[in-house]
Image (spheres, grey):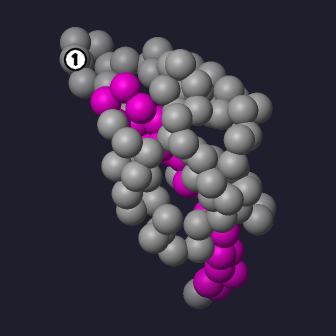
Amino acid sequence: MTTAALTAGLERIPDQLGYLVISEEGVLASAGELENDEHTAGVIMQMVRTASRFRLSGSAEPPFKRLSVILEDFVYAITVSGQKVFVVKRQHNQQEPINV
């Protein structure tokens, strides 16, 4: 699969600051603030492996498809598809709580 096919659509995500496409072998593609960020890729893969251990009894389905890591200034949106993990770092547009 070509890099263009792997990253199709990732660059068009609103407020994105960078992205990673990761497999068990390592980083397949990266751009923006996550370009060549092997450390972040390793941390995210460990999080995905840990979350994958939590299976519902009797379920053959993976325990999740998406995982969000929300920090003060940005969000990592993580999607698992096939044997690849797609990570997009987005600006976190915090909204003030509404008091009723």
Q: Position of residue 37 (x, y in %)?
A: 73, 40
Residue furthest to the front in view is: 2
Query: In the displayed structure, does residue 57 sit left or right of residue 100?
Result: left
Magenta stretch encompasses residue 80: yes
Image location of residue 100, percent across then percent down: 59, 87
Residue at point 45%, 21% (across, down): 52
Q: Nearer the viewer, residue 18 or 75?
A: 18
- Which class describes the residues within 10 Å of circle 1: few (<14), some (14-19), or many (20+)? few
Furthest residue toward bottom: 100
Examine the rendered structure and indicate whether residue 6 appears above or below residue 22. below
Q: Is residue 63 above or below residue 20?
A: above
Q: In this view of the protein, can residue 55 be seen by the observer?
A: yes
For image coordinates 59% across by 66% down, the residue present is 16
Q: Image check: 60 left or right of 35?
A: left
In-front residue for pair 81/94: 81
Q: Is residue 24 magenta?
A: no
Q: Which residue is mark 1?
A: 60
Horizontal and vertical percent for residue 82? 31, 30
- At a point 69% along the width and 48% down the height, the residue shown is 35
Q: Is residue 98 above or below residue 51?
A: below
Which residue is at the front of the view, 58 or 13? 13
Q: Type of residue at label 1?
A: Ala
| Residue that appears at 62% across and 54% down | 31
Q: Is residue 97 visible?
A: no
Quadrant where the N terminus is found in the figure: top left
Q: Going by the image, does 22 lie left or right of 55?
A: right
* Magenta segment: 78-99
